[in-house]
Image (cartoon, rainbow, N blue to C red):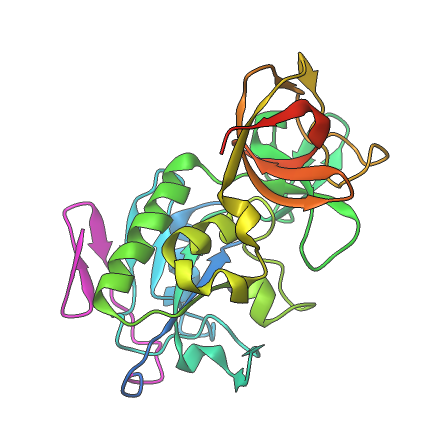
Amino acid sequence: MKIKEHKIDSDHVSIDEIDKTSGSFEEGLPDTIVIHYTAGPSVSSAVNTFKDPSVEASAHVVIDHDGSITQLIPFNKIGWHAGESSWLDRTDLNNYSIGIEIVNAGRLEKTGSVWRSWFGKTYSEDDVLRAVHRNEEEESWWHVYTEKQITATHDLCRNIMNAYNIKHILGHEEIAPGRKSDPGPAFPLDKLRNRLLHSNRKDQGEDDADKKTGVVTASALNIRSGPSSSTSTIAKPLSKNTKVSILKEQNGWYNVEVKLRGWVFKEYIHNTE
Ligand SMILES: [Zn+2]
């Protein structure tokens, strides 16, 4: 993947240019990437919405479940993905940022033994994650992202960073808290930006603990949504010798990342780094 004349140059990327922009970025911009979920069922529903002239929304790219990318707006043009937003001393983040939309249903409701999106599609246990949103206190159910989507997002961000002077990678939920919940806790946003923006790690609220790793020493270790045994488990227990990345420590618990992120009792983690 390469970026040529503000468009992704790759056989695996389709370019489907739309005219919903506010013109070119100012000199030195964009310097920010904003990550979103589409809150929809498919790439076609997202692209059709962005193409609809009656909808005042657009984004630079959409990433499908299989990791394939559709680019709608060249990266030097201002899109309409952030809406009313603020970050540090800035407002209206559209004027600073590239918008990446990932096809994902967002928050799900549990009904009986299935989970349902706002648009009526149902999901099985493998498709859901129970977690507390960074802007909330109660747990919700979230549609999981595919590994291919996460890898494609990482690769795309890295390529965008090679072409532009990117300083911030943010979630829509961080620039419009209360109004927006995307990309939500199922997306590894902190990990993504820590990997891509090392020098900004402290600004992003993560301390150096996020470099540590460990292995599980208990035969079965509950992984929970919060740092307390009164919070619910979010997946099957981790088995002995599972490798984890340790992101944070709080009250004797580690926040770890395996394929998902949750809290385990730290006594049962042996630090390996
Ligand atoms: Zn959004």
Q: Give coordinates of residue 122: x percent, y percent.
A: 61, 34
In the rendered image, the vertical position of residue 33 relative to residue 264, given as above or below:
below
Q: Quadrant of residue 21?
A: bottom left
Image height check: is 33 above or below 207? below
Report whether 267 appears left or right of 142: right
The residue drawn where x is 67% and y is 55% is 134
Q: Nearer the viewer, residue 179 or 56?
A: 179
**Left or right: residue 141 compared with residue 13:** right
Left/right placement of residue 245 relative to residue 147 reads right
Quarter assignment of residue 88: bottom right
In the image, residue 6 lies at what x, y percent?
20, 69
The image shows residue 91 at horizontal and vertical percentages of 53, 84
Name the magenta segment's main secondary structure. loop
Image point (45%, 48%), residue name = 103
Q: Residue at x 55, y 29 (%)?
A: 214
Task: Please check the rendered image and state whether residue 14 is part of the magenta-colored stretch, yes or no.
Answer: yes
Q: Which residues are magenta?
A: 1-24
Q: Is residue 187 visible?
A: no
Name of the residue lying farthest toward the bottom: 26
Q: Is residue 198 above or below residue 25?
A: above
Location of residue 236 in the rendering, given as x and y in whole percent from the top left corner: 66, 21
